[in-house]
């Protein structure tokens, strides 16, 4: 009998304990002790005590109850951890929540509410939204405090972010200090209200990313916020508050927005099938997301495939051309020289799908439509541009935002954003003049405009295909015309027909390449560059090959691929790499070369361990081999070819260390009577570019001569052109020039050579190298001249003028001083810093 009573008592105690840990409300008589939890009525969230990973510190917090991976969304005592398990979270008679030791000897956190009528009807309830609310009254008539007003690092659906105008509370989401420390971290996500309300991610006082202004559909800087977005976002601005609220359309989805310790804002959704949080969206995502990346009046476009992502707004030009050329847009733009504004003829250029500039300097009038907004801006000489305040309103749009003063942080999107109208004068307006299709009635647009666009598109496609088929003229790929996916097969077919004409090349099936490279195994990988990876392969006949697999994300497209195949196939010289064939399969583009076991020249001359394998005799032979290869390209082949990317890594060495020039993806064919050309698409590698090419897009055989001069000095010194810059000294060209003027040029020779070199030959090569890197192209020798100089040691060589690209590093950063001759400014020649990504 006593045994039965004992079992009954045990079961009763268990049921009471289970009930006490499953309720959703705390009262004066029911505190929450460490070890127990509150669970919301729908069992979505739990409140209790936890310890982050790798620490024994205790915190009171809220987490998802039904998510197997404990995910904390709110923490009470963020900066005041508990070091034991004897604490209690309770409601007291003053109407406050307290986190304290059981004996009340120490308080770790409280809601700190004052002026509340004292009674015994206080309670705290955990809601299914994840909000912990402190109520007063038997029926919970009054809400005194809620955790949603004091967010941690998580912004939950239903939570308000922004200003309570009655209390002055501006809710801020802030990161944890680290993954195991929920204290207030460096990054915060909050709304600011100067001009028009905007959301900012900041590190301290430094802005990291801006979500843009509210468009009526979402934030202009968050392109994914469309009417079909999984969230229903709303912005409220009335006498009581100015806030944004997100709600999930499907309440069964668990979703959270987190400010991370690494300085990002990330949206996660829970995947129950995989039992993990899946990243849904994040920011900042690309370099154009960085706040004010392109400076005042700058415009950032991350979709520009081959050039600097920064541009200037219409009517503006870079404030510092030198900084612009080294891909630094932080100084922004200025009005074009000679521009006169606020005169008859002023107008506006529309920029579509953009995040409008920072509205801190903007003025907002929501009573005006878009046309009235335009007139308002045009009448005010200080108005720089305008945009609609609400693009969700039909017809002309609702609301008016006008900008006065500097405009920061403008960027474009492939989808999303809104239209922004920038003020320009009559001259600039004429450059951007076009028919305003957006003014046509919708039925006119469907009936007339779409067929015209379709016809133009088909015509352009036909012309492009016809030109490829005839191979009449290779272009520089400057049109920016993107071939749709549906035409890739057609383009590939035309490419194969072009290449196949009179070409003794093998066309390899993809399966053959896969077998030869062991499915592109890492053990067969020879190297990697900006255009993809190179793998060693073994054909079924035992022949070793090198397979250049072009990256699908590479900027080298069909044109460059075809360029390289057709060029190398036509070129036959012992100092040029030999192309065996190619493979083209859907998005895969591969070139199959002869295998050269010693890889690139850079792997020898810049490697202290291997540099000693190249004595001076061998280096001089390599130099003369490169000269013969370039001489063939420029003068002796039936084509006149500019390589445009000559550098140490593009000179390969065979078994006997004989040089072979490789990588003709950027090469340019000249007609017999052509000497130079210009391009808006500057491609290649800084550190090897001639100044006229880097700055003006002007290239000729003298551009390759300049690159050869750099390469020649690198072979002699065993140092990269930019290595001296990193040592707070001159770059290689400047270093050699200084030594040359002091008659100490031989001191630049690679130390691995010791004294075992022919001083006359070395001095001759240094002299030739300096002649090749002179600033003016007309002063440089041709490769014919170079070949003669290097084989006629008794010949009288001209005295060199000061070379280009001489800069000295100052102690406070990367800024540089131009050469004494006042030549063209340029960059420190970082090998990885390029105008065309490679």
Image: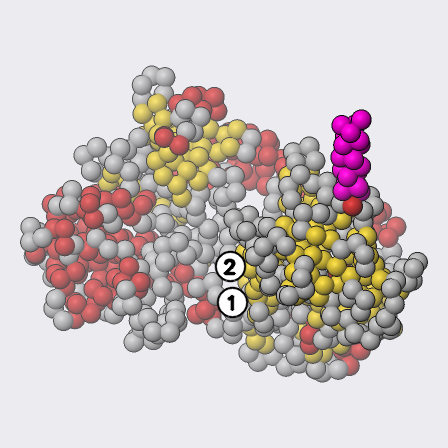
Residue 493 placement (x, y as % from top left): 55, 29
Q: Is residue 577 left or right of residue 363?
A: left
Q: Toward which corner of the image does residue 727 lie, by quadrant?
A: bottom left
Q: Residue at x 27, y 67 (%)?
A: 730
How far is mark 2 from mark 1, CA to CA?
Answer: 9 Å
Majority secondary structure of magenta residues: helix
Mark 2, residue position: 308
The magenta-colored residue range is: 1-19
In the rendered image, the quadrant that contains the N terminus is top right
Mark 1, residue position: 329
Residue 90 placement (x, y as % from top left): 75, 59
Whether the magenta-drawn stretch holds residue 240 is answered as: no
Contact flag, marks 2 and 1 (Cβ < 8 Å): yes
**Of 636 and 281, the residue lying toward us:** 281
Q: Is residue 611 left or right of residue 329?
A: left
Residue neighbourhood size for the residue with mark 1, other residues' Cα within 10 Å, grouped as few (<14), some (14–19), many (≥20): many
Residue 551 placement (x, y as % from top left): 48, 39
Q: How is the image coloured?
A: secondary structure
Whether the magenta-drawn stretch holds residue 12 is answered as: yes
Mark closest to the chain's N terminus, 2 or 1: 2
The correct choice, above or below, for 194 with respect to 327 in the image is: below
Residue neighbourhood size for the residue with mark 2, other residues' Cα within 10 Å, grouped as few (<14), some (14–19), many (≥20): many
Helix, strand or loop at label 2? It is loop
Residue at the limit of the structure toward the front, as seen here: 2
Helix, strand or loop at label 1? It is loop
């Amino acid at each position: 009998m006593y045994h039965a009573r004992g079992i009954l008592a045990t079961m009763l105690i268990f049921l009471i304990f289970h009930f006490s840990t499953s309720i959703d409300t705390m009262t004066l008589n029911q505190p929450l002790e460490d070890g127990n939890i509150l669970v919301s009525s729908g069992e979505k969230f739990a409140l209790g005590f936890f310890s982050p990973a790798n620490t024994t510190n205790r915190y009171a917090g809220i987490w998802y109850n039904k998510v197997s991976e404990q995910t904390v969304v709110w923490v009470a005592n963020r900066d005041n951890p508990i070091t034991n398990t004897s604490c209690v979270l309770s409601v007291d008679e003053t109407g406050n929540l307290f986190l304290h030791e059981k004996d009340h000897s120490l308080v770790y956190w409280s809601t700190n509410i004052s002026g509340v009528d004292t009674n015994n009807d206080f309670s705290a309830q955990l809601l299914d939204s994840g909000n912990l609310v402190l109520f007063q009254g038997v029926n919970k008539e009054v809400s005194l405090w809620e955790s949603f007003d004091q967010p941690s690092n998580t912004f939950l659906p239903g939570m308000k972010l922004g200003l309570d105008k009655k209390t002055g509370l501006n809710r801020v989401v802030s990161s944890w200090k680290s993954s195991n420390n929920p204290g207030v971290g460096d990054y915060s996500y909050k709304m600011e209200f100067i001009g028009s309300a905007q959301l900012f991610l900041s590190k301290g006082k430094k802005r990291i990313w801006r979500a843009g202004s509210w468009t009526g559909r979402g934030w202009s800087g968050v392109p994914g916020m469309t009417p079909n977005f999984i969230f229903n976002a709303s912005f409220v601005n009335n006498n009581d508050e100015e806030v944004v609220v997100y709600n999930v359309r499907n309440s069964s989805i668990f979703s959270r927005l987190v400010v991370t310790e690494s300085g990002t804002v990330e949206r996660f959704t829970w995947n129950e099938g995989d039992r993990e949080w899946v990243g849904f969206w994040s920011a900042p995502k690309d370099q154009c997301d960085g706040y004010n990346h392109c400076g005042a009046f700058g415009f950032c476009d991350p979709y520009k495939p081959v050039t600097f992502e920064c541009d200037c707004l219409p009517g503006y030009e870079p404030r510092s051309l030198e900084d612009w050329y080294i891909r630094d847009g932080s100084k922004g733009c200025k009005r074009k020289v000679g521009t006169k504004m606020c005169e008859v003829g002023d107008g506006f250029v529309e920029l579509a799908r953009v995040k409008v500039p920072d509205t801190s300097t903007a003025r907002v009038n929501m009573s005006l439509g878009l046309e009235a907004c335009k007139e308002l801006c045009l009448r005010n000489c200080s108005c720089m541009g305008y945009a609609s305040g609400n693009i969700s309103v039909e017809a002309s749009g609702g609301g008016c935002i006008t900008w006065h003063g500097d405009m920061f942080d403008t960027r474009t999107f492939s989808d999303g954003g809104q239209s922004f109208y920038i003020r320009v004068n009559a001259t600039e307006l004429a450059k951007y003049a076009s028919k305003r299709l957006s003014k046509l009635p919708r039925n006119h647009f469907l009936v007339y405009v779409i067929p015209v666009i379709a016809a133009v598109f088909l015509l352009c496609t036909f012309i492009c295909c016809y030109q490829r088929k005839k191979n009449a003229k290779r272009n520089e790929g400057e049109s920016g015309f993107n071939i749709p996916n549906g035409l890739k097969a057609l383009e590939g077919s035309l490419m194969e027909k072009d290449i196949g004409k009179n070409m003794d090349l093998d066309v390899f099936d993809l399966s053959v390449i896969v077998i030869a490279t062991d499915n592109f195994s890492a053990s067969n990988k020879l190297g990697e560059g900006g255009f993809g990876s190179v793998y060693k392969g073994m054909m079924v006949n035992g022949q070793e090959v090198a397979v250049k697999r072009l990256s699908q994300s590479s900027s080298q497209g069909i044109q460059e691929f075809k360029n390289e195949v057709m060029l190398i196939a036509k070129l036959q010289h012992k100092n040029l790499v030999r192309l065996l064939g190619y493979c083209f399969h859907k998005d895969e583009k591969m070139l199959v070369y002869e295998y050269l076991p010693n890889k690139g020249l850079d792997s020898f001359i810049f490697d202290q361990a291997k540099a000693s394998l190249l004595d001076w005799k061998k280096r001089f032979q390599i130099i003369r081999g490169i000269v013969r290869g370039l001489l063939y390209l420029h003068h002796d082949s039936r084509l006149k070819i500019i390589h445009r990317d000559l550098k140490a890594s593009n000179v390969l060495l065979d078994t006997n260390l004989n040089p072979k020039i490789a990588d003709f993806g950027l090469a340019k064919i000249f007609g017999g009577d052509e000497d130079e050309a210009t391009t808006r698409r500057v491609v290649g590698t800084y550190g090897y570019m001639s100044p006229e090419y880097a700055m003006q897009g002007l290239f000729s055989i003298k551009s390759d001569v300049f690159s050869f001069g750099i390469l020649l000095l690198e072979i002699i010194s065993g140092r990269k052109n930019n290595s001296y810059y990193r040592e707070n000294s001159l770059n290689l060209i400047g270093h050699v020039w200084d030594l040359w003027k002091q008659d100490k040029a031989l001191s630049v020779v690679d130390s691995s050579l010791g004294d075992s070199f022919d001083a006359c030959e070395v001095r001759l090569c240094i002299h030739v190298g300096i002649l090749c890197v002179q600033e003016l192209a007309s002063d440089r020798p041709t490769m014919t001249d170079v070949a003669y100089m290097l084989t006629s040691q008794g010949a009288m060589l001209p005295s060199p003028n000061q070379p280009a690209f001489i800069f000295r590093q100052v102690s406070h950063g990367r800024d540089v001083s131009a050469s004494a001759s006042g030549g063209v400014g340029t960059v420190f020649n970082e090998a990885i810093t390029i105008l065309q990504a490679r």
